[in-house]
Image: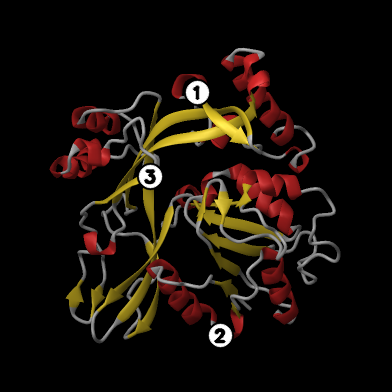
Amino acid sequence: MDFAFVPPPAKDAGIINASEMLTHRVGASGMIPASASSLKEMLVFVDARAGGSIGSVSIVSHASPTHVSFPLTATQSQPSIYQVLADLYKPPFPFGAPAPFHQAPASGATPIPIVIKGCRVGRSEAFMRLLKSIIGEGVTVEAPQHFNYFLHIGNRTARYIVDCLCYDFEIHRKDRITTHADLRSAFSSASFERYDGSAMPAAELTALIDQLKTERLSNYLPSTSTKKEIKIGLKTKIKFNETVIGKTVHAMTGKQGIAQYRALRVSKTIARMNLADFDAKPLADHVAKAEADWNAKYQSANVLGGTVKKSFAEYLGLHKGEDPALLVTWQASNDKDGGVEGKRIEAVFYRYELILPLTSVSDGALLFASEALKGPALTTPVTWPSNSAHMAALFRRV
């Protein structure tokens, strides 16, 4: 039996669409109620109703490579970011004994798939393995390595929900980009790859960037004081190889809002201290200590039993393998901690992103899974690639 959890939708169109899709796919008896909002409560619900046969468990979540939106237990007050999960992982884990899945398969049997349907969480192997360690033996954890969207398409006689992905091409700079030409050059020369390992055509990226020409530079290039993330919708044409009641659908474009430009001046606090401690040594020494403290706490041998660890660079918001010394400006700002005058040490850099639909490298059509809510089923309801290496580039499984 399959199960699914979808958080309360509020006004979130993606959550509403995901709920429609999974309710149709899983059925009412497999939908975990919103009141079971923590991971432990979700798993206990599944275990109590599975009747000895657990299929897959899908959990819809706002997410990133550093967090998921659901708490682990009902009493957890902090967000479910990597550091909090690692701090909580001290066996026996708070789930306690017996494990949430009483009917977890025996060693060597097919594991239960836990599918986290949340944007880009699969990009971080360290975070994925931490989730798996927390849930326990007898499961696999799967999540997309790209942005995950649930789109509603159709007409008066046919309605479908499409589960699709978007690339997230991200550039980091120590010094901010100040001209359109430099932004265009940064994306055209970045050597981004598509899911099959081939180069993403630079012309497609620069065409998207050039849509920003109608904006003032200050509207899309962060300044040294920008606080809020910049988000600008972009127009795209998406090839959709299906006929919906006699009409071929080609344009899921700006109305769907899935192509976007984003930019942000990132400022992350890595340490806070009183003035006496700050004045005792150079700024570079404080930075070195903050990195050493991170490594000691989150990369030591006793964290996650020696599995893949998250790096200090990833903690700052850089890509794995990027060098903070080359991409980050360290600065100290006045601060008050408990009313005591002090300093806050921050890592500052600039992030520029292009989000665009993930399409087939063979024919340019949108890749997706779907459910027919009204009308005939689509000819090909699932179009994910059959190549296992390509699928691994779309979805990480641990």
> Badge 1 local density, few (<14 within 10 Å), some, or many (20+)?
some
Q: Nearer the viewer, mark 1 or mark 2?
A: 1
Numbered badge on residue 28? 2
Q: Circle 2 sits in a helix, a strand or a loop, which is it?
A: helix
Decide if residue 328 is in sight here: yes
- Asked whether disc 3 touches disc 1, contact meaning CB atoms under 8 Å apart, the reply is no
Q: Which quadrant is home to the N terminus?
A: bottom right
Q: Amino acid at mark 1?
A: Gln
Placement of 65 over or under 27, stated as above or below: above
Numbered badge on residue 228? 3
Numbered badge on residue 16? none
> Badge 2 local density, few (<14 within 10 Å), some, or many (20+)?
few
Q: Amino acid at mark 2?
A: Ala
Placement of 115 over or under 79, stated as above or below: below
Q: Earlier in the sequence, mark 3 or mark 2?
A: 2
Image coordinates of residue 176 in percent, x first then y, are: 33, 27
Q: Earlier in the sequence, mark 1 or mark 2?
A: 2
Q: Which one is in front, 23 or 53?
A: 23
Q: Residue furthest left?
A: 214
Q: Earlier in the sequence, mark 3 or mark 1?
A: 3
Q: Which one is in front, 384 or 155?
A: 155
Q: Circle 3 sits in a helix, a strand or a loop, which is it?
A: loop
Q: Amino acid at mark 3?
A: Lys
Q: Which one is in front, 89 or 359?
A: 89
Q: Circle 1 sits in a helix, a strand or a loop, which is it?
A: strand
Q: Quadrant of residue 5?
A: bottom right
> Badge 3 local density, few (<14 within 10 Å), some, or many (20+)?
few
Numbered badge on residue 331? 1
Placement of 116 over or under 207, stated as above or below: below
